[in-house]
Amino acid sequence: MDRTAADPMAGRVLEGRYRVGARIARGGMATVYEATDLRLDRACALKVMHPGLGDDDDFAGRFVREARAAARLSHPNVVSIFDQGDDDGTVFLAMELVRGHTLRDVIRAQAPMAPTRALQVLDPVLSALAAAHHAGLVHRDVKPENVLLAEDGTIKVADFGLARAVSAETQHSATGGVLIGTVSYLSPELVVDGRSDARSDVYAAGVVLYEMLTGRKPHEGESPIQVAYKHVHEDVPAPSRLVAGIPPYVDALVARATARDRDLRPADAQVLLHQVRRVKVALDHGVPDDPELTSDLTPAVPSQRVGADDIDYVRDEQAPTILAPEQVARGGARTDDTSEIRAAGGGPRTRRSRRGPLLLVVLLLLAVSVAAGGWWLGEGRFVSTPGVLNLPAADAEAKVEAAGLSFEVGGRAYSETVARGLVVRTDPAGGEDVDRNGTVTGFVSRGPERHPVPRLSGLSLDRAQASIARARLSYGAATYRYSEKVGRGIVVRSDPPASTRLRRSALVDVVVSRGPRPVKVPDLTGKDADDATRVLRQRGLQVTTEEQHSDTVEEGDVVSQTPDEGTLFRDDVVELVVSLGPVLVDVPGVVSRNADDATALLEDAGFRVRTERVDVYIGLGVVVRQSPGAGDRAPRGSTITLSIV
């Protein structure tokens, strides 16, 4: 069946650039299509938000900001984001097209996987998550469907930022709220109170590892609520209960990553990655059991934790075993039972040469010296730096000194994942070789790096951008809006508001004034002056009036206005000229006058004259009646009617 046949998106060109092709996948929040970037002539993938979400302005705004933040995450194991757009309400992301299949397909075909293979797949996934956690991003939807295996073998993690945008909008709960993400991979804290951090991604990665090892999800139920309940109240079982032969330290690794108490989990994906590599070294060397490694990885009660595994870095290569001098001496002390020969029958002993035993002793001493020198110049000269991340400085110092090294605090550093006052990193790092009696320098966490948004209102856009940079934040975008109080080009406010504390390089948007909103001036000539004044004031304009006689415009109507067209701004003035009607003139009295004289007199006064004969006309040509009458006032130019006999 052709999936694109009934899809209205197929064939559309978004923003005049991206031609939508076949549908690749569909999820709860978006649909992914194969597409062509017409501008750059390359294939890409388009993730198109479902209309119900894209129409929500608040959600779309968060989605855009998180997409921009995720686009700044550059890592070989992260699907790259190329562009973001909104085509008449269709919100979309343009991203790297990864041809291949998902980890879900691999699990269906290959699970249960050998532990070595499972960790080989998980390693780049954790590497991608570690880069995100270092940048302050939490994925929130780690699952096999979001792990892509390209045709060339590259493993990439998709959907960074999308789940974050949704979680900012939606409260999660296990009692009637909305659970964002696949319920099988939700951490207990997400189910209980909807809050997550890097350790929630660690939990999901541990569940993915369990699924690769066993071919099954750790918690199953008849409904999502039942599965969520098990995440909160039941531990993830040991993979070896389903698949025989899995070493105990692999069980411990899964238990550590999926501990229900997030304080018992690795602090972030970087810590889990080092633990995975430590286990992989043991697997690569065929170690069936390592009680010390198993003990280090097994979650402990927080008060009993000494931080041995929060972070024990290990080398990927195992150094060859070199016997210590005492081991060589013990081995060389063994002698052959036939080294001393006696004559049969109890006769006199044969004379033995002293050269043989003496040579043996010399060779033995040489072997001991060579072994001791090699041990000292090689492995014996160095000790492995103990892992002390997430420990208070005093505990870290005690642990380092127990290994025969010195410890000093070298300074303080910000960390998104390590609590304030705990060791965030060491030099040399945990697991690295250091000379015996050497010094380990520890750096103590200052907690998450947060910077307040500076006050930007009243600044020009250039000065606002400079102020954002000085605050160690990043300029996002400007939205232009009309303002009656703030001049054109001046920042009205910031988003987030001033004094909001953000992580380093977080985006700050600004609203910039376009100046006062233009007001279109209507032509009100000939309209009632009161109505015209009301219309203009409703548009925020001021009105002045003056009165003027008009022979053509009725009294009370607008004779003219200034300006009579174009645009003004709020509180600008429109001048109206209001008609007083025509000028009134006293009508001269012309009764008893000759008709010609009467006509001339009235016309000189500005009137028109109309004559009519009375019923009994006798031809005298004398005015016997006028209308209007003498002493009346009439508009200049109006008609006076004369009756003649």
Image (cartoon, helix red, strand yellow):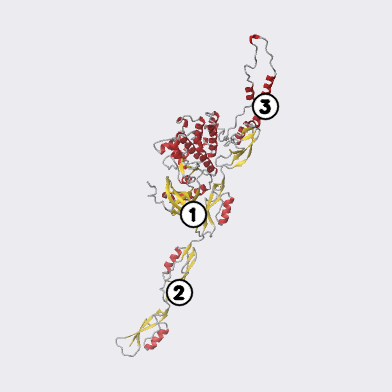
Query: Horizontal placement of 221 versus 125: left or right?
Result: left
Measuring from the top left, give residue 446's x and y in whole percent.
Answer: 59, 41
Measuring from the top left, give residue 58's x and y in whole percent.
Answer: 46, 50
**Which amino acid lies under the numbered mark 2 shown in the image of this protein?**
Gln
Give the residue pinned by disc 1.
39
Name the residue located 41 percent from the left edge and 71 percent from the top edge.
526
**Which amino acid lies under the numbered mark 1 shown in the image of this protein?**
Arg
> Which mark is first along the chain, 2 or 3?
3
Q: Is residue 538 visible?
A: yes
Number of the label disc, if any, that sits on residue 600: none
In the rendered image of this protein, does residue 352 appear above or below residue 243? Answer: above
- Alpha carbon distance from label 3 to label 2: 124 Å
In the rendered image of this protein, does residue 628 appear above or below residue 148? Answer: below
> Which mark is first along the chain, 2 or 1?
1
Query: Horizontal placement of 548 versus 370: left or right?
Result: left
- Alpha carbon distance from label 3 to label 1: 72 Å
In the rendered image of this protein, does residue 162 appear above or below residue 337? Answer: below
Pick out the residue farthest to the left: 616
**Which amino acid lies under the numbered mark 3 shown in the image of this protein?**
Ser
For the residue labelled by badge 2, is the local secondary structure a helix, a strand or a loop? Answer: strand
Query: Horizontal placement of 98 versus 611: left or right?
Result: right
Measuring from the top left, give residue 190's x and y in whole percent.
Answer: 47, 40
For the residue labelled by badge 1, is the local secondary structure a helix, a strand or a loop? Answer: loop
Question: Do the numbered discs 3 and 1 sit on residues whose CB atoms are within 8 Å?
Answer: no
Name the residue located 45 percent from the left edge and 63 percent from the top edge.
539
Give the residue pinned by disc 2.
548
> Which mark is first along the chain, 1 or 3?
1
Question: Do the numbered discs 1 and 2 sit on residues whose CB atoms are within 8 Å?
Answer: no
Badge 1: residue crowd in 10 Å (few <14, some 14–19, many ≥20): few
Give the residue pinned by disc 3.
369
